[in-house]
Image (cartoon, coloured by chain):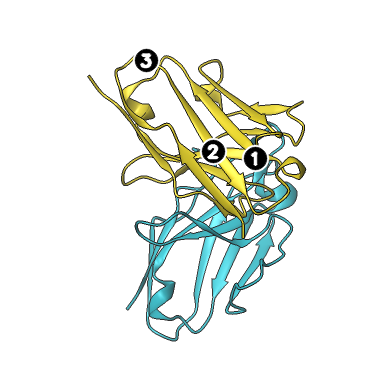
Chain colours: A yellow, B cyan
Amino acid sequence: EVELVESGGGLVQPGGSLRLSCAASGFGFSGHWMSWVRQAPGKGLEWLANIKQDGSATNYMGSVKGRFTISRDNTKKSLYLQMNNLRAEDTAVYFCVRMPSFDHWGQGTLVTVSS
Amino acid sequence: HAGLTQPPSVSKGLRQTATLACTGDSNNVGDQGAAWLQQHQGHPPKLLFYLNGSRPSGISERFSPSRSGNTAFLTITALQPEDEASYYCSPWDKKLNAWLFGGGTKLTVL
C-alpha cells in the first residue's frame, strides 16, 4: 500500500526556516516525480514544486521560487522541502504528493508562521 | 491561479447530474486537459482522473471527464450524499512550467 508520511511542520516566526520531510513506502519511490502542495486554512490547493525521479530537474511556483527548495534522497525513499524566509501567508497544511497527476497524498503537516 | 476558473459552488439534487467546469487557456487546459481531484472536508484530496483522462482503480463510473477547447468538465451522474465535496481541476501549464489548481468547486447534494 502506498504511504506518504510528512513531518517537520510546526510554529515558526516570520523570516524563519523549516525543513519538511516525507517518508515514502509501498511503491518504487525512485520511479516517480514527486510534488509538494499546500492548503491554507479554509482555502484551495496550491502546487509548490516538483522534482524528477533522479532529482535532476525541478520546477517551482513563482511565489516560492528562491525561498523554497525541493530535494529527494532515493536511498532513503524521502522527499524534502527546505523553506526559508517564511511569511505569514505561508501558513498552511503541506502535503507530499506522488505524481503523475497527484495520485497519492500524505495526510499533511501543518506549518504556522506567526510571531 | 488567476487564469484558471472554477465556479465556487454548485448545488444539485439527489440522483441528479452535476457538471463542473474548469476554464483555462491554450497553455494549460487547452493543451493537455486537466486532472480532477475530490476533497472531503478534513481529508487530503483524492485523484479522480489523471491528466490523460484515465480513471484510477476504485473510482466510480458515475464520474467522467471531458474537454471542449480551453474548458475541462467533470460530470457526476446519479448524485449521492457522499459526492458532497470540493472538486479541483489541475492542468500542467507549458508556458509557466508549473502545475495549476483551480480554486475548487464545492458541490452540495440537496
Q: Residue A71 falls in which quadrant of the image? A: top right
Q: Nearer the viewer, residue A73 or A40?
A: A73
The amino acid at mark 3 is Gly
Reply above or below: A58 against A85: below
Q: Earlier in the sequence, mark 2 or mark 3?
A: 3
Reply above or below: B24 against B37: above
Same chain for mark 2 and mark 3? The answer is: yes
Q: Earlier in the sequence, mark 1 or mark 2?
A: 2
Q: Are marks 2 and 3 in contact (CB under 8 Å)?
A: no
Tell me the element at label 1.
strand
Q: Earlier in the sequence, mark 3 or mark 1?
A: 3
Q: Are marks 3 and 1 in contact (CB under 8 Å)?
A: no
Q: Residue A55 falls in which quadrant of the image? A: top right
Q: Nearer the viewer, residue A62 or A21?
A: A21
Q: Position of residue A79 (x, y in %)?
A: 60, 34
Q: Are marks 1 and 2 in contact (CB under 8 Å)?
A: yes
Judging by the rendered image, the residue that carries numbered circle 1 is A34
Furthest toward the left, the residue is A115
Name the residue rendered at 72%, 36% in the picture: B94
Q: Position of residue A11 (x, y in %)?
A: 30, 27
Q: Residues within 10 Å of mark 1 (few under 14, many from 20)?
A: many
Mark 2 or 3: in front is 2
The amino acid at mark 2 is Cys
Compute the Cα span from label 1 to label 2: 10 Å
**Mark number for residue A22?**
2
Q: Chain of mark 2?
A: A
